[in-house]
């Protein structure tokens, strides 16, 4: 039997299971997604960079020179051209809100969904490179992809999952998991920055990793820089075309409602302890609350430090910088969102630490992994764009809604929120052509009821608890079958002649 066969089975199953998961649920539209897709539509339909024709559905805008622009880094909008251009060529522009939502859904799958599935595949390769069996590596990849906010953000047109993919790819292009390639690492970092400004931190973090592990420092540094230059050129060209300078970002011209007068550049303060707590351990946006299995990943990094000092230091430095800079944002919580979305690229990097706790703390690991999987499944099924008034969104909104159809009574939340966000699943009712819910479409209309959805609702109706059951059955069957096959094939390829003799005697 081919020893590589279990790896092919595992990576194929991972990609299929994860892409199915991310395509099954659709978190809907919102300011962020609409601003990104508006630019994609402007490029494909009219060869324009301004979004004057479409901007009525978003507040995430910049104004300059008499035009309205998306306030996002343009990378995801450019990437979304790949699926949207053929859709537009075949069917034309969307003619109503339901068509617009369908186009946005398909575009989200091809960009964020595929990126999330590839994160799982890369994490599997990283675990296998460090000596784990196919079954163990498969399990870790699933837990990280489905038990962290990667799940939720892979179901919507947000840039954070593609940025996370490129951040992980840059690291693995330098650590030996993939064949060492400084050019690829530089290109991956450049692509990450083109998706998410905060990934500019990785330019220096990954360069430090390269210098710490390179024998040909000058040559590899030049390759690293060369890999990133095309993406820097694209970003510079876009900013020049829109704002008249390659160094002018969207921040100075952004919607004034997002700026603070007493903050540097309108958005930065000194890092704040309360924000750091909020991003890490609080029920509000805390990574380790929403995905407590990541606590074990941090412990694993300590063990990793003994064997891979430079790699462990790179991960820790990158994660700390993301959380510290995120804590300096005036809107550090990310508004209607879940978890620390601005710091999401740190998650798959931190997750490599799980490799080093494999086989230890088994009961603790099983409990924390189960909680992480349940919390993030519930968030994804109900509403990844939790209103920022819920200070404990998981236990006060998401889980009560999933089980009962309504959020829990919470005196800190305005009563109208509880009346608006009802249903067991898919409670986001903002249609893709609206700025606010029911602005254009009445409550109960198809446009509002199908603004977010899961595929099971096609059978059981919008908001139905039963709609999640087909997903759970299909994924459970696929995962259990794959893991059984991996165990069987791995044992067969790692059986020694002595072991075979002993088995035949016992038989």
Image (spheres, grey):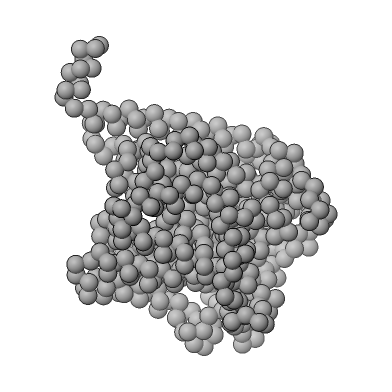
x and y percentages locating residue 293 in the rendered image: 50, 45
The residue lying toward the viewer, choosing from 44 and 325, is 325
x and y percentages locating residue 412 in the rendered image: 78, 56
Q: Quadrant of the C terminus?
A: top left
Q: In this view, does 150 lie above or below 33?
A: above
x and y percentages locating residue 187 in the rendered image: 35, 68
The residue lying toward the viewer, choosing from 9 and 332, is 332
Image check: 208 left or right of 256? Answer: left
Image check: 131 left or right of 385? Answer: left
Q: Outermost residue, left direction? A: 497
x and y percentages locating residue 490 in the rendered image: 29, 32
Q: In this view, does 118 lie above or below 37?
A: above
The residue lying toward the viewer, choosing from 376 and 109, is 376
Can I make out residue 461 in this image?
no
The residue depicted at 47 percent of the width and 43 percent of the height is: 143
Q: Quadrant of the N terminus?
A: top left
Q: Outermost residue, right direction? A: 415
The residue depicted at 24 percent of the width and 31 percent of the height is: 493
The residue lying toward the viewer, choosing from 473 and 360, is 360
The residue depicted at 32 percent of the width and 27 percent of the height is: 488
Can I make out residue 245 in this image?
yes
Q: Is residue 153 above or below residue 63?
A: above
> Would you identify the image quadrant in which residue 218 lies?
bottom left
Image check: 97 left or right of 367? Answer: right
The residue depicted at 68 percent of the width and 43 percent of the height is: 399
Q: How many marks?
A: 0
């Amino acid at each position: 039997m081919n020893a590589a066969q279990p790896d092919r089975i595992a990576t194929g199953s991972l990609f299929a299971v994860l892409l199915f998961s991310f395509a099954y649920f659709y978190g809907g539209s919102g300011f962020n997604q609409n601003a990104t897709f508006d630019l994609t539509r402007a490029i494909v339909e009219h060869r324009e960079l301004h979004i004057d024709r479409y901007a009525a559905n978003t507040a995430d805008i910049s104004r300059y020179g008499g035009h309205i622009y998306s306030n996002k880094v343009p990378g995801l909008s450019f990437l979304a051209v790949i699926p949207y251009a053929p859709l537009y060529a075949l069917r034309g522009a969307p003619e109503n809100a339901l068509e617009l939502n369908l186009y946005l859904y398909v575009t989200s799958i091809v960009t964020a969904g595929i990126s999330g599935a590839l994160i799982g595949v890369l994490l599997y390769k990283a675990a296998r490179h460090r000596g784990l069996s196919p079954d163990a590596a498969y399990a870790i990849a699933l837990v990280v992809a489905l038990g962290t906010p990667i799940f939720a953000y892979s179901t919507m047109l947000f840039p954070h999952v593609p940025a996370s993919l490129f951040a992980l790819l840059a690291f693995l292009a330098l650590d030996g998991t993939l064949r060492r390639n400084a050019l690829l690492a530089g290109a991956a970092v450049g692509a990450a920055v083109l998706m998410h400004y905060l990934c500019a931190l990785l330019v220096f973090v990954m360069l430090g990793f390269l210098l710490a592990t390179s024998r040909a420092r000058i040559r590899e540094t030049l390759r690293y820089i060369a890999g990133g230059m095309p993406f820097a050129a694209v970003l510079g060209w876009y900013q020049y075309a829109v704002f008249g300078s390659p160094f002018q970002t969207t921040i100075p011209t952004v919607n004034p409602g997002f700026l603070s007068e007493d903050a540097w550049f309108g958005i930065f303060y000194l890092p704040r302890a309360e924000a750091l707590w909020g991003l890490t351990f609080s029920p509000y946006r805390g990574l380790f609350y929403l995905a407590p299995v990541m606590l074990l990943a941090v412990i694993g990094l300590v063990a990793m430090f003994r064997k891979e000092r430079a790699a462990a230091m790179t991960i820790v430095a990158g994660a700390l910088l993301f959380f510290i800079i995120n804590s300096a944002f005036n809107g550090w919580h990310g508004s209607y969102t879940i978890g620390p979305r601005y710091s999401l690229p740190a998650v798959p990097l931190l997750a490599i630490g799980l490799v080093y706790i494999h086989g230890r703390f088994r009961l603790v690991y099983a409990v924390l992994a189960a909680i992480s999987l349940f919390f993030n499944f519930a968030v994804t099924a109900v509403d990844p764009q939790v209103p920022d008034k819920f200070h404990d969104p998981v236990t006060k909104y998401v889980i009560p809604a999933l089980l009962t159809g309504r959020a829990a009574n919470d005196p800190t939340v305005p009563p109208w929120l509880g009346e608006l966000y009802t249903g067991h699943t898919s409670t986001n009712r903002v249609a893709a052509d609206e700025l606010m819910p029911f602005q254009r479409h009445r409550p109960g209309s198809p446009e509002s009821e199908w603004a977010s959805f899961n595929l099971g609702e096609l059978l059981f109706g919008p908001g139905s608890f039963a709609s999640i059951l087909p997903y759970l059955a299909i994924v459970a069957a696929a995962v259990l079958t794959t893991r059984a096959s991996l165990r069987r094939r791995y044992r067969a390829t790692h059986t020694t002649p002595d072991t075979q003799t002993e088995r035949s005697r016992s038989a």
